[in-house]
Image (tube, rainbow, N blue to C red):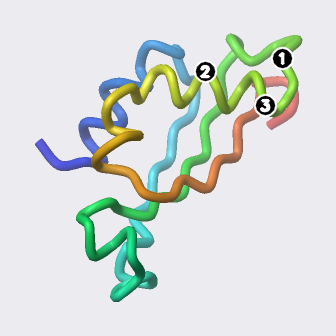
Amino acid sequence: MSRIEMMGALLAALEPVALEIADDSAKHAGHAGARDGGGHYRLHIVSAQFAGKNTVARHRMIYSALGEMMRHDIHALNITAKTPDEN
């Protein structure tokens, strides 16, 4: 299973109605995080679970769902997290 597939499987816990994950690692070749094996990703996620939550709380929910991947597989994550009403 690829990292993007693993991320998608873990983020399913947030019941997204839309989920896009892009691997931007190639743009950061030679960067310290890339040398250590961590990837650079761009995430767009839409979930009703974000309703009433500010940006920091939404990001924490995402980090929690991704768990160990945030410690080892993901060096950088650019997040756009919205509710269905905001999308």
- In the rendered image, the residue lying farthest to the bottom is 30
Q: Which mark is residue 40?
A: none
Q: Quadrant of residue 1?
A: top left
User: Is 32 or 5 nearer to us in this picture?
Assistant: 32
3D distance between C-alphas at marks 1 and 2: 10 Å
Quadrant in the picture for the C terminus: top right
Q: Residue at x 43, y 57 (%)?
A: 75
- Marker count (numbered): 3
Mark 1: give few (<14), some (14-19) or many (20+) Cα within 10 Å.
few
SS state under label 2: helix
Q: Residue at x 53, y 30 (%)?
A: 63
Q: Which mark is residue 56?
A: 3
SS state under label 1: loop
SS state under label 3: helix
Whether tag 1 and tag 2 are in contact, CB under 8 A, the answer is yes
**Residue under numbered circle 1:** 53
User: What amino acid is found at the position of numbered circle 1 in the picture?
Assistant: Lys
**Residue under numbered circle 2:** 61
- Mark 3 or 1: in front is 3
3D distance between C-alphas at marks 3 and 1: 8 Å
